Amino acid sequence: PDSQSAQTWHVARVGPGSPAAFAMRLSVLTLSGRELASLDAADAWTKSDICPLIPELEGPVLRASRFWYNGVELTDSTTLQALGIEDGACLQVVVDKSAIELVVTGSSDHTARIWHVQSGECIRTLAGHGERVMSAVFSPDGTRVLTASFDATAKLWCAASGDCICTMQGHDAWVYTARFSPDATLLVTAGDDGTAKVWSAEAGACLRTLQGHEVAVCFAVFSPDGAMVLTTSLDGTAKLWNPSTGECLCTLCKHDSFVCSAVFSGDGALVLTASWDHTAKLWNADSGDCLSTLEGHGEHEVRCVAFSPDGTLALTTADDRIAKLWSVESGECARTLRGHGNAVYTAAFSPDGALVLTGSDDRTAKLWCTNTGACLHTLREGHDDEVTAAVYSPDGSQVLTASAAGIAKLWDTRSGKGLRVFRGHSGAIASASFSSDGARVLTASSDGTARIWCVRSGQCFRKLGAESCDALLSAAFSPDGTRVVTATLQGRACIWDCELGERLRTLVGHEAPVTTAVFSPDGAKVLTASEDGSAKLWDTASGTSAASLDGHDAALTCAAFSPEGPRLLARAAAALGCGVK
């Protein structure tokens, strides 16, 4: 590679056969369109003939590389001719990061290190900063690493060799974070000098300085389409910028205190947030305008919010022992659900919106009629401690509750009768959920394990992890039900194979307990929230952090993807500047 980016390698005569045997010239491109090699090839060539000709693909990266042409994979047993590849064609190389399992870490020892997850071996040390490294991320294609340091610089590194490609100098104080644009052509840094800067990833030159915050800029990130930059600052504001012009597009407002819950409406047009400032707020997801403030829980912290499936009602719960239903259109309270004896921590609508389920610190869960506000059933049998979770089955016919006593229970929503008791945890159950087909139940416990249960038999199908002091705070199925992600008290998240019970990936990067971990709708990403005040997006295949969503002033208790996936989530959060970002 040259000093800025990987060089395109032109190969005139390599591989089997004589020059006369070369029937075509083809290009090898990354997913982002960057050309890795341009080479002469023979019809009979296979993957094994091409791999050695691309110097950038070496070691574990080489073994994990897969080549595709028009949706068909070139393997060691298929030839270029068999795939119909002709002169001038382009092969696309995809690095299966799950086969590499690399993570990058930054340290107060002034270095960043690249690690092989499975072996725990440090395979590369990136040395060159003069102060602690505060941020380290892989490029989207995994070939480069970007670091930010308290030495007031950011550095771009070749992941394969560990060589420093270029150094970004321009900040007058600490650099907290540095991030790639989605196409990896631009970089953005956030500094203690109150500015963010946009850089050319090719030349390392500063293209734009984003000035407007009054004090330190703690975080900066590109929007998924690269058209905007979002910054957050210790001045209590977030700002949206045009990275091409440096223009501040808007300054984003927020609650007066910690935002502890946020959800999208079903169509993604609205966002509902809950805050410890005793209110919930309805927002327009496109404009970021606050449409109404839902006040009615007195001086009590609002804990949980939800939209009805048709988007006409909003549901809030609080420490005042009640839940409230609100008209989304008017912002007026439509019904108050009274009956719990202690704080109401969780609530959800049934899939058809006819029922509301609440869970409380009074050790019960309750089913309510949405239309009348009447309590239909109190689900108390079998729970000898506070109810920590309450969720509907996908078809709405059953309810699953869990308690601090380490027991989960299945209920019939029509009769309110208990159907099944799931026993086995030795500690409090922090979360409980159904698989998408409703056939399995997943629980996470302070005993350090997650358990998968068969709904029909009530038997434990798989135990994930060993009982330990590293308590689990949440667990969630992947959309296809083949994996589980768990969040731990020790600041880690782990991805597991449901069938084998084996840990596939450990996501390390938070500095405090991870309170929530969930898969994106397509299963390609994991979103985590932590008491360190940040949320992080992770690539499930590689286990690397794709983005760190900083800016909260207190612990994050939850995080969620919008139904359309991370694109809409990031856009709406950027517009709001609060809740999940």
Image (spheres, rainbow, N blue to C red):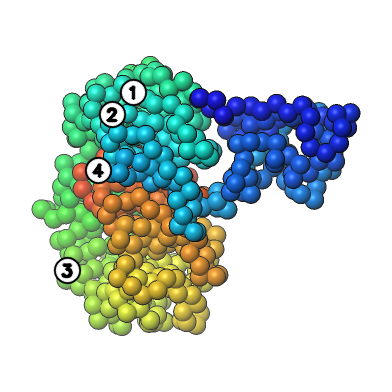
Q: Mark 1 falls on what kind of element?
A: strand
Mark 4 to mark 2 CA distance (whole Å): 23 Å
Nearer mark to the viewer, of 4 and 2: 2
Element at label 4: loop
For the residue pair 147 and 3, the one nearer the viewer reads as 3
Location of residue 417 with respect to 524 vertically, above or below: below
Q: What residue sits right under mark 4 in the picture?
A: 552
Locate the C terminus and report the quarter of the image it occupies.
top left
| Whole-number angstrom distance, CA of label 3 to CA of label 1 | 55 Å
Instruction: State which tag comes first along the sequence, 1 or 4.
Output: 1
Can see residue 390?
no
Q: CA distance from mark 1 to mark 4?
A: 27 Å
The residue carrying pointer 3 sits among few (fewer than 14), some (14 to 19) or many (20 or more) residues within 10 Å by Cα, namely: some
Which is more N-terminal, label 1 or label 3?
1
Q: Work out whether residue 173 can be spotted.
A: yes
Above/below status of 374 relative to 54: below
What number is the disc on residue 169? Answer: 1
The residue mark sitting in front, 3 or 2, is 2
What mark, if any, has residue 342 been given in the picture?
3
Q: Position of residue 434 (x, y in %)?
A: 45, 67
State the image coordinates of residue 166 (x, y, percent, origin top left): 43, 26
CB contact under 8 Å: marks 3 and 4: no
Q: Residue at x 49, y 30 (%)?
A: 184
Task: Give the amino acid type for the residue marked by disc 3 in the picture.
Answer: Asn
State the residue position of label 2.
Answer: 152
| Comes first in the chain, label 3 or label 4 | 3
